[in-house]
Image: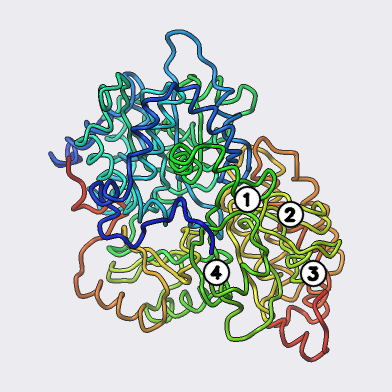
Amino acid sequence: MSRKLLLDNLDKPGIQSLTGYSDNGGYEALRKALQMKPEEIVSEVQKSGLRGRGGAGFPTGMKWSFIAKPEGVPRYLVCNADESEPGTFKDRYLMEHKPHILIEGMIISSFALGANTSYIYIRGEMMYVFHILQKAIDEAYAAGYLGKNILGSGFNLDLHVHCGAGAYICGEETALIESLEGKRGNPRIKPPFPAVKGLWGCPTVVNNVETIAAVVPIIKITGEEYAKIGIGKSTGTKLISASGHINKPGVYEIELGVPVEEFIYSDAYCGGIKNGKQLKAVVAGGSSVPVLPAHLILKTAAGEPRLMTYESLADGGFATGTMLGSGGFIVMDEDTSVVKNLWTFAHFYHHESCGQCSPCREGTGWMYRILNKILNGKGEMKDIDLLWNIQGNIEGKTICPLGDAAAWPVASSIRHFRSEFEAYINNHGMKDVKHYYRLNNLQEA
Amino acid sequence: MSANKNIQFSDDALALVQKIINRYPEGKQKSALLPILHIAQAEFDGWLSPEVMDYVASLLKIQSIEVYEVATFYSMFNMKPVGKCLIEVCRTGPCWLMGAEDVVRYIEKKLGIKAGETTADGMFTLKTVECLASCGTAPMMQIGETYHENLTLEKVDAILNDHKNQGNRRTHWEKDKVKP
């Protein structure tokens, strides 16, 4: 069983409240941090090897070190709680059950960055969590953890929670900043990066909920100790959102390095495939990352056991590998239509494209319509190549990574499950692809 | 824009609006736009008419067009009237795997409407939405601030019957939480 640094004490009564959280070691890291110099905190985070938990996996300490410090200009820390990547629900779980770990992490991180006003941008659909966070913030003010001269340190911080209103794109950090400024969530062209010119033109760091929460245990146990957990450059623990055809869906905190096979089949985690069926495919890191068939998610192309780390999941590149991404682990059983699943993702990206860049705005809709045509029995063989062509003309050709995120599921579904597309086309969009495989005694590639 | 005299937030809502505006630096009050549009939907029957948007613009001292362009961008803002109970069923991958289509078809049949439509009595609007970060408890739907998770058709029945019996309006920022 993995060590718990974020989801510890969840069974303790009242852990959602400041009292319950404090009774179980909460806000001890804050007391420790306020005795340190801000740059010492940045250095601890650098030593920890913590990487952004929102999906990109960029080293957090390095991101922090980029923040510009012009005289007389305020700096901002913004927490990205716009969790919208299909398959991902860990941040909602953490904020709902342990809001104070996020508040504590925000205070420590703001102190480290020299921010005196910080925001948590939460997606609007999670309005009930917005109220939970507001209550936690009110409690923290009353306890003297927020406001002026926090615990006598001379450090001042105002922390606010801000709600979005339904837009996946606002999880992209510059779109999030635009949205926080009260505008449409159109990503900005980089550079300048937010660390130089972010919220209201001021130096800004945007970090994911889990990233900021992880700063609390890092300060508590030191960066060096944190870095001992995990393998190589995948240090620490990671929250994995497990969903789909498994016996035990839910949020699991794992030490990075757990074998994928153990994660899927062990009773400590997913507990195996539902109804005793076989595993067909996994989307390991949220809808944007490449889908892999069973044999490639369990083992790399070289036959090594695949591990839950940034590096192991990416082994083989996109030809045979995928990404850890946000840790949204979606499991599909043998009866699942990969084409139909892709169709739901294609609809998602078409719906969520902000419309700024033509390849994404037009391409996502085009891909969705072609998939619709294939599912409805009107597909032609050349449509598969057309899909391939379109996704290739979106990838890397847009301002923000939504274009890539829309392209990768299409590319990987065709790469690994081309015969299934062909089956739909040959059988005029048969209602249920599993019958095709059973009738023809075929094994999916 | 000429403000419509009939459009006015409650005192509680106005106090809350002021509190929210104070969270942003002076001159950056436009940042309060998204939260305030949520409050506007809670105050005015769950949708944003042009008059309501003009009123929000006047509260924030910005142009009406700045409100329109934002309101039309975000999926949670309703640009036309909706039923008292807006049912939002998640349709994305993980929920689809667990039977979201069955839930949508069942509600369509039960209410006699298609997704996107409102019942004749104005009680229910059915909408399919994209991932609500509830994939481990799929299938799911949202009504007001409430997530209804691990849905079965029996559960859906009970939830819809409850709402029909209560008959009150639900909004994403619930009206009873519009307090300073």
Q: Quadrant of the N terminus of chain B?
A: top left
Left or right, residue A342 beside residue B27? right
Q: CA distance from mark 2 to mark 3?
A: 22 Å
Of all residues shown, which one is farthest toward the left? B11
How far from the left and from the top, in percent, is residue B176?
18, 53
- Per the image, the residue denoted by label 4 is A269
In the picture, the quarter occupied by the C terminus of chain B is top left
How far across and down, in percent of the image, does residue B24 sit?
A: 33, 26
Mark 1 and mark 4 residues within 8 Å of each other at the beta carbon: no
Which amino acid is tagged 2?
Answer: Ser
Badge 4: chain ID: A
Which secondary structure lies at badge 3?
helix
Give the labeled residue for mark 2. A312
The answer to whether tags 4 and 2 share a subunit is: yes
Closer to viewer: mark 1 or mark 3: 1
Q: Which residue is under mark 1?
A: A230
Judged left or right of residue A59, residue B6 is left
Gap in angstroms between the C-alphas marked 4 and 2: 19 Å
Residue located beneath label 3 in the image: A417
SS label for mark 1: strand
The lab-note entry on whether marks 1 and 3 share a chain reads yes
Which amino acid type is shown beneath numbered disc 1? Gly
Rounded to the nearest angstrom, the CA distance separating label 1 from label 3 is 32 Å
**Tag 4: residue type?**
Tyr
